[in-house]
Amino acid sequence: MNIGGQTNCSASYAFSTLSAIEDRICMQSNKTLKLSPQEIIDCDFNSFGCQGGYVNKVLAWGKKKGYITEECMEYTGKKQECEVDHFESNQCRIESFIYKINDFCIAVQPENIKREIIKNGPVIGQIIPHTDFLAYSEGTYMKSPDSFKFNGQHIVKILGWIQSIDGSSEWIVENTWGEDWGEKGYAKIQGGRGDTGVDMYALGMSTLPYTLHDYYSIQNMASATQDLQSDQIDDVETQEFAQ
């Protein structure tokens, strides 16, 4: 799976959130897809484009408006103007090729985060980024004493954990800085430490494994089948009456 590369656009909030949703859809449907972070960056005015944003707002977007795939709106690495008629002119939205989520929830504390991952799949977590995290290449990341904190938070996808003999957890995360960073885009972060905050809380969501287009098609087919069955019943009743 390709690891998202946000480049110089501070959009980990969009990349990691959509990546977790993609994984959960894949678990339900066995199909892979890439959702479009560009639409969120350009058109979700509850966040700040390439200057950061909020995971809960991205999830609320998916619950209300749904997500389009990257084929419909490719990533450019910068915020662009959202077309005034975007929702009426984007071909994927016109044809209802969008994925929606039912709802989302928060899991607080490590054991609840683990429970959510086991039950439903990857979750969205946040870390307090420090300078030495930029240089991480392998092994288990623990903040060094001489590193300093960046402003804001950084959003990652948490896939699982490794339980150590001493009872501590190393969280396996997917970052948004491309495959040249860390262990081909992934990292192991030591849990139980307040300096990274990786296991303080995480967000999960309930996904739908089909597009609205698929849903409408199924509904139309069901309606047509029901109409056909009704017609057949009417024919039988007419024949019986004629006899």
Image (cartoon, grey):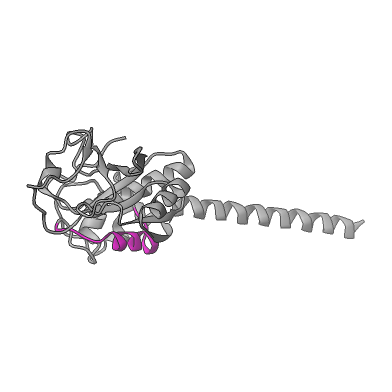
Q: Nearer the viewer, residue 160 or 40?
A: 160
Q: Is 66 colored magenta in this rendering?
A: yes
Q: Nearer the viewer, residue 221 or 14?
A: 14
| Left or right relative to 219: residue 139 | left
Q: Is residue 99 visible?
A: no
Quadrant in the picture for residue 83:
bottom left
| Left or right relative to 138: residue 199 | right
| Left or right relative to 21: residue 120 | right
Q: Is residue 25 visible?
A: yes
Q: Nearer the viewer, residue 52 or 38?
A: 52
| Left or right relative to 25: residue 59 | left
Q: Is residue 164 above or below residue 104?
A: above
Q: Residue furthest right?
A: 243
Q: Which residues are magenta?
A: 51-67
Q: Residue furthest bottom?
A: 46
Quadrant in the picture for residue 178:
top left
